[in-house]
Image (cartoon, rainbow, N blue to C red):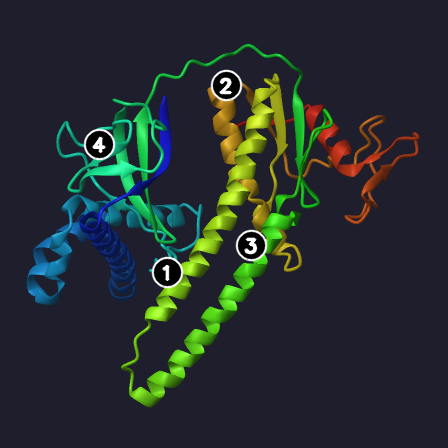
Amino acid sequence: MKKAYKIEIRPIEKQIIKINQTIGVSRFIYNFYIAHNKEVYENEKKFVSGMDFSKWLNNEYIPNNEDKQWIKEVSSKATKQAIMNGEKAFNRFFKGESCFPKFKKKKNQDVKAYFPKNNKTDWTIERHRIKVPTLGWIRLKEFGYIQVNSIVKSGTISQKADRYYVSILVEEDVGINHKSYSEGIGVDLGLKDFATCNNGLTKKNINKTKNVKKVEKKLIREQRKLSRKYESLKLRNKNDKGEVTRQNIQKQVVMVQKLHQRLTNIRTDYINKTVNELIKQKPNFITIEDLNVKGMMKNKHLAKAVAKQKFYEFRTKLISKAKQNGIEIRIVDRFFPSSKTCSRCGAYKKDLKLSDRIYNCSCGLSINRDLNASINLANAKKYKMA
């Protein structure tokens, strides 16, 4: 089984320069490929494949433009991978799976540096360090997290909020335990509580806790500071004819990025612990609902609250962990009326509002609506396998 690991690294100054250079070139090539394709399509009504663009870039564009020779200073396979990523984005758009490819911005830090395996000693893992092609040995922040002498299939390095991370795909032998200890679980996801299970387990909304609210409040203050610095820069550039530096702005940008990353880490950690708690119960199956998150995000009053819950990340990690432990994942259709159906008599209550937190049925049942929904999900007869 292939397993992915992501861990923070501590590169030296020389390695940081090389990583930043590779990330910058990869971002430029990705954006250039998208822009070139748009231009060619407008003029000639045809699509340029990644292979054709790579040949044109290396044989025509770079030799004829001396100011673009810096592209050759990084690994040719890293630039090739950026082009292939752009082609994948276009293919997904043609299939209707995603929107038209967007340009990658420097501030978003969503580009990874690809370092290919050139010889047998590349991507060697030791307890406290990892050998990356062209960079050499880099110290790991956590020791013993990745198994020593693991077979690495591929690896990338990314940057987030002034920190560097290595992501590797490792081939491992994982023994699957098919023995089950408890009955199936129905999980209802929501905004008031993150997850409600039919066995009584309820996971609260982490975004309503004191810790998260404190960080969010600090983030608002730092964003306000950043905004004021940008306005001040505009005035100074007007007076000094564009010769003002932006060193303090860059420091403030990093501060804002760190707070965003801290919030992301808190939410991701909570999802990991919730998934682990469900898997440890070793149920026969886990039933979840196929939520229309894209449709929920269109509601301007709920969009921010929905985005904070990270429902898709929870679903992805739950499916992955369940497969490792031999647990069946059932996905019920999004139009299944789990909240509006009585879990005792099966009656359908059409006029149930979102503000009604207690489900009262004519059969005498009075139950929390989320618990009622989780029981219906656990007892659902129509579903598909993940």
- Residue under numbered circle 4: 123
Mark 1 nearby-residue class (10 Å; few <14, some 14–19, many ≥20): few
The answer to the question of whether label 4 and label 3 lie on touching residues, with beta carbons closer than 8 A, is no
Q: Position of residue 55 (x, y in %)?
A: 13, 51
Looking at this view, name the residue that lies furthest to the bottom. 239
SS at mark 1? loop
| Residue at which label 3 appears | 215
Q: Can residue 339 be seen from the camera position used here?
A: no
Circles 2 and 4 in contact, beta carbons < 8 Å:
no
**How far is disc 1 from disc 2 in space, using C-alphas?**
39 Å
Q: CA distance from mark 4 to mark 1?
A: 29 Å
Identify the residue at image location x=65%, y=20%.
184
User: Is residue 253 toward the left or the right of residue 15 in the image?
Assistant: right
Sequence-first disc among 2 and 4: 4
Q: Residue at x 15, y 42 (%)?
A: 134
> Residue tagged by mark 1?
107
The Cα atoms of the two marked residues, 3 and 1, are separated by 21 Å
Residue 25: x %, y % from top left:
22, 55
Q: Say whether residue 100 is visible.
A: yes
**Which is more N-terminal, label 1 or label 4?**
1
In the picture of the structure, the residue carrying the numbered disc 2 is: 325
Whether residue 177 sits left or right of residue 15 in the image: it is: right
Q: Earlier in the sequence, mark 4 or mark 3?
A: 4
| Tag 4: amino acid | Trp
Q: Say the numbered circle drawn on residue 259.
A: none
Three-letter amino acid code at disc 2?
Asn
